[in-house]
Image (tube, coloured by chain):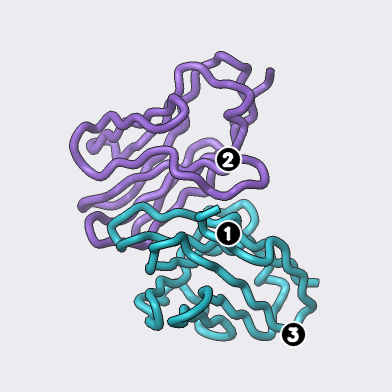
Amino acid sequence: NAGVMQNPRHLVRRRGQEARLRCSPMKGHSHVYWYRQLPEEGLKFMVYLQKENIIDESGMPKERFSAEFPKEGPSILRIQQVVRGDSAAYFCASSGTADQPQHFGDGTRLSIL
Amino acid sequence: AQSVSQHNHHVILSEAASLELGCNYSYGGTVNLFWYVQYPGQHLQLLLKYFSGDPLVKGIKGFEAEFIKSKFSFNLRKPSVQWSDTAEYFCAADSGAGSYQLTFGKGTKLSVIP
């Protein structure tokens, strides 16, 4: 399957732990976007990355959240010291260029105990 | 700031009924518009998109949407729904060429009763 791959599908963490969410873009895509969907809400933009560069992180919370897209390997969304309010579905999307439609992964559902 | 509103939270229809899901956006400039569908347990899939040109856009699976600039609307339609159309539908917008930040509505759950 050459689609956007996210793992894990479900992630359970206790308060204070770290959560790492991974995203491998579609083959040939170098633009990656992360979105968060809180319960009963639409998806909200978090960050836009290209290889080794953060282009726009205007939707990222100022603390505890970080993202990277290294030269090799998947994009990682990292949440440190998780709190209950971080429980959400996190979706990754990719595109070939910034102008092309974004293709989404299955999402990672993060639950905080 | 740009926003996207979807009027219905949950729509229940019988098979063969016609469907119209409302979507309004608030942005005065150039805009690209999208409808995505999320089937149960699956990822978001692009149904159709409007960038420019003919305001009546045809998508996959018999769906279409009409861009009405004067009403800031981009409603999704299908003449006859099937049970397999049961899913959640999201309207989204970005602010035109070179833009990448999608703004999504809250989604509309469609349940089709056989």
Q: Position of residue A12 (x, y in %)?
A: 77, 70
Amino acid at the residue labelled 3: Gly
Examine the rendered structure and indicate whether residue B11 appears above or below residue A111. Answer: above
Label 2: how many Cα within 10 Å (few below 14, some 14–19, many 20+): many
- Alpha-carbon span between mark 2 and mark 1: 13 Å
Compared across the picture, whether B58 is left or right of B21 comes to: left
Q: Using the image, tell me which numbered label, if any, was put on residue A37.
A: 1
Q: Amino acid at mark 2?
A: Glu
* In this view, A11 is above or below B110: below
Q: Residue furthest top?
A: B16
- Residue A61 is left or right of residue B55, and the answer is right
Q: Name the foreground residue: A47 vs A40.
A: A47
Q: Quadrant of the C terminus of chain B?
A: top right
Image colour for chain A is cyan
Q: Tag 1's secondary structure?
A: strand
Q: CA distance from mark 3 to mark 2?
A: 33 Å
Are discs 2 and 1 both within one chain? no
Q: Position of residue B22 (x, y in %)?
A: 44, 34
Please tell me the numbered disc located at residue A16. 3
The image shows residue B106 at horizontal and vertical percentages of 53, 48
Give me the C-alpha separation between circle 3 and circle 1: 21 Å
Name which residue type carries label 1. Answer: Gln
In the rendered structure, the colour chosen for chain B is purple
Quarter of the rendering occupied by the N terminus of chain B: bottom left
Give the quarter of the image for residue B33: top left
What is the crowding at mark 3: few (fewer than 14 residues within 10 Å), some, or many (at least 20)?
some
- What residue is disc 2 on? B88
Q: Residue at position x 64%, y 63% from top?
A: A108
